[in-house]
Amino acid sequence: MKVFIVAVGQRVPAWAQTAYDDYAKRFPPEIKVELKAVKTEPRGSKSLETLYAAERARIEAAIPRGTRTVVLDERGTALTTVALAARLQQWQLGGDDVALVIGGPDGLDPDFRRSAHESIRLSDMTLPHAFARVLLIEQLYRAWSVNAAHPYHRE
């Protein structure tokens, strides 16, 4: 199974990249996690629709055909770690590769959000994008550890 983390924004602080890399290397061979950072559209005087369209095109180009698309959105379904573990297991058993999409400064194109297979949220609070990447990969690793009865996650 491949898990693609598709994130708008190519530059993150060194601490965030270090933390992300630490969790990414912990996954077992049967789950390959790949970060696909896509360029943020320069803001300038462009309309929101223009920004959304440009970032949506980049996001869609980064997601391989046939991949299950899950957007991270403040309006998405709240999941506990155990519920995320169950979702991860469903994706694995279904043979699905999954793209988890983190939007840019203005979020994601509304039509793209609606077209996704599902929508989840990481937090009720607004998170910096670099931190969202770290939190997401940590929670994916924790979800894997729940399913594998690995001691990383203790209830």
Image: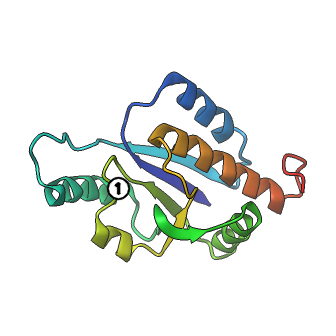
Residue at mark 1: 107
Three-letter residue code for mark 1: Gly
Residue drawn at x 68%, y 74% is: 90
* Count of numbered badges drawn on the protein: 1
Taking the image as shown, residue 61 lies to the left or right of residue 128, namely left
- Which residue sits at x=32%, y=60%? 60
Which image quadrant is residue 53 in? bottom left
Residue 135 location, x and y as percent?
61, 45
Quadrant including the N terminus? bottom right
Give the x, y percent position of residue 123: 58, 56
- The picture places residue 153, in percent across and down from the top left corner, at 84, 51
Residue 68 % position (x, y): 49, 70
Q: Is residue 82 left or right of residue 15?
A: right
The residue positioned 68% from the left and 52% from the top of the image is: 139
Report the residue that reaches farthest toward the front. 125
User: Considering the image in quadrants, where does the C terminus appear?
Assistant: bottom right
Scheme of image coloration: rainbow
**Horizontal side, residue 41 vs residue 4: left or right:** left
Residue 128 appears in view: yes
Q: Is residue 65 above or below residue 101?
A: below
Image: 116 above or below 9: below
Residue most extreme to the top: 14
Look at the image and tell me whether residue 71 can be seen: no
Identify the residue at image location x=64%, y=40%. 24
Q: Is residue 86 left or right of residue 113?
A: right
Please identify the quarter of the rendering in which residue 111 is found: bottom left
The quarter of the picture where residue 115 lies is bottom left
Secondary structure of the residue carrying tag 1 is loop
In the rendered image, the vertical position of residue 105 relative to residue 15, given as above or below? below
Which residue is at the front of the view, 7 or 96? Answer: 7
15 or 36, which lies in front? 15
Q: Is residue 138 above or below residue 63?
A: above
